[in-house]
Amino acid sequence: MTSTMGRMLLAMAGLLAASAAAAQSADPPSAYTQAAQAEVLRTSPFADRQDFDFARRGFVATRTDPLIRNAAGQPVWDLSAFDFLKGEAPATVNPSLWRQGQLLAIHGLFKVSDRIWQVRGFDLANITFVKGDHGWIVIDTLGSIETAKAALDLANQSLGERPITAIIYTHPHVDHFGGAGGLVSLADVQAGQVQVIAPKGFLAAAVGENIIAGPAMQRRAAYQFGVPLPKSALGQVNSGIGPGVAVGTTSLIAPTRDIDHTGETLTIDGVRMVFQFTPGTEAPVEMNIDFPDWRIVDMAENANATQHNILTPRGAVVRDAKTWADHLTEALTLFGDSDVLITSHGWPRFGKAQIDDYLAKHRDAYAFLHDQTVRLMNQGLTGDEIAARLKLPAALEQAWYDRPYYGSLSFNSRAVYQFYMGWYDANPVHLSPLPPVEAGRRYVAAMGGAAKVRAMAQAAYDQGDYAWAAELLNRAVFADSTDTAARSLLARCYDQLGWQSENSLWRNMYLTGAGELRDGPPSGARGQAGQAAVIANLPTPMLFDLLAVRLNGDKAGAGHLKLAFIFPDRDERTYVTVENGVLIHQAIAAPGPVDATFTVNRADFLASIFTGVPLAAKVASGAAKIDGDPAALVRLMSWMDPPHPNFPIVTR
């Protein structure tokens, strides 16, 4: 099942050559950039090498062939792609981020204990194999079926082949459930041979973040993860919490059992597990897993090798920093006697003192972020003003796992402000701001024209003031997207800002933006067949939720419809109305007359709605039936807008 994300990544991979060429046309790191890198080297604790010991401890084996391929033989992941991360950091990479890249590039199968192993470096996340009495309990699945299968094959080859008895999703982000189809079959799950366990609310959250708002998030995710960038010292060096995102095939197998409270205990395949239910933290629903008999705790993605995001740049529901900190405080109480700590990203921590210090300082970073943002907010500062002022205490800033490789205090403080106050900063001028293009034209005119704006920006660039130069040039580019001189200089600003960034996502976004200023956004339409395959296992109401957010109210206008859908293969009925530009659906039989009733197997309905396969052949064969107006479904679909997968970001 190829997801929209998977197709996006494969399509974007075609831009690598162009991006590499663009990087070659960039200016070299300026004296200001070199000075910034030197300051990081001077002020950061590079003598502390404990993380390298933890990351390499327990190494068993890795693949002899570094390329993981899909069924068509195309590479979806290259374990050797980050081999360039050797020696000292070049001036094009922040030395702290280079160090993080070196750690995340360590790949293979690692023994955590006599019963737990992890495969790391095969995708953005880790996959954990727990040895039960009869088979493997798998915690998180990686993001694609190809990388998940490669990890399972490595574990079986190295440790002895065992069946999978259970899969546990710690939370509903695709890099933790997308590989399930490479480990088990849906038929085995439906037959009860494999349990799939997840926190309560998993499916709704997975759909909301990966499907309902999926197209917009996936476009922005290409920036966040630097998908079109070459993996090199001039491009992508890591993704903060993992080496990168594999461009494979995504699956979704729904859970068969929910965890809904802290303290819930399960014994699966002879392994006792106690769960901490942590909704509202790194994901809308999430859970940590304790193995009390072994004194090992899995903190999922609630504790990481980096500061995380309160609001991820790709877009998502804003997270609750206070709730996150409170759950870490609870974890310290629940799991304070653990000897080993593992996570869904990064490497384990060994030793009670190390674990307590790690959890406490991780907790303190989120608590400080929350409390100080709210304090300054209550003094009248806006989100942008707080972001410019806030700085972690030295004891936290010097902890490598609180450094901003993935999340940042700047971005996160604005997210906390948004969590409480929304996007509006109370200044009336921002009640109805001008759209970017109109604002750009007016600002450029007010500053005396494009040539003067470019001259001011060049002066700022020459002084190393890249952020201000970018602010000026962004106005110029939105005022006139054909201004190649402004686009070129803005790209050069983004190069320098990206090279200086300690945050992997900021680096990726700056450098991806620079590439699109030079070459334009990706082109080429992509169909919806892949998404239809991914959502095939979703509850029917969620499918109609997806249609509701695709309805173009202007196209529908004063039009109205009443439709009944009967899916005999699932014994389901759905009543749909369209009126006032809104699609409403209810899982009931139609309460009165309708324009048409469609009796069709759900798979055929999905093929028609999401991939455009006509129902006519099914109707002719008797596999489907239409009572009423046969054109009603066509009318409904004519009101739908397909997503725009390649919308512009740095230009208009």
Image: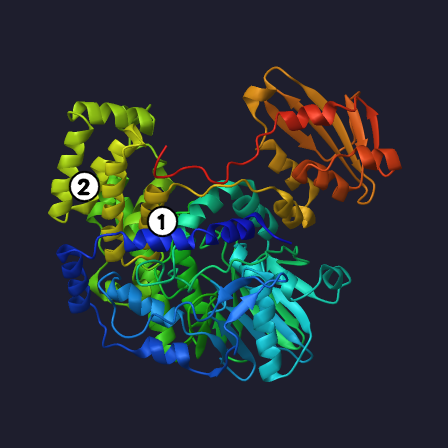
The amino acid marked with disc number 2 is: Trp
Judging by the rendered image, the residue that carries numbered circle 1 is 512
Q: In 3D space, how far apart are the residues under numbered discs 1 and 2 (Cα atoms)?
A: 19 Å
- SS for callout 2: helix
Percent from the top left, x then y, of residue 231? Answer: 38, 62
Q: Which mark is residue 468?
A: 2
Name the residue nearer the viewer: 518 or 460: 518
The amino acid marked with disc number 1 is: Thr
Q: Residue at point 60% right, 25% down?
A: 582
Tell me which corner region of the image, top left, top right, bottom left or bottom right, holds residue 521: top left
Mark 1 closeness class: few <14, some 14–19, many ≥20 residues within 10 Å: many
Percent from the top left, x then y, of residue 454? Answer: 18, 35
Percent from the top left, x then y, of residue 373? Answer: 28, 47
Across the whole image, how many numbered discs are drawn on residues? Answer: 2
Percent from the top left, x then y, of residue 389? Answer: 19, 48
Tell me which corner region of the image, top left, top right, bottom left or bottom right, holds residue 592: top right
Above or below, 536 relative to 639? below
Name the residue nearer the viewer: 456 or 500: 456
Q: Is residue 370 left or right of residue 4?
A: left
Q: Quadrant of the N terminus?
A: bottom right
Q: Quadrant of the C terminus?
A: top left
Judging from the image, the colouring scheme is rainbow
State which tag comes first along the sequence, 1 or 2. Answer: 2
Q: Is residue 58 left or right of residue 100?
A: right
- SS for callout 1: helix
Q: Residue at point 50% right, 40% down?
A: 645
Mark 2 closeness class: few <14, some 14–19, many ≥20 residues within 10 Å: some
Above or below, 183 relative to 499? below
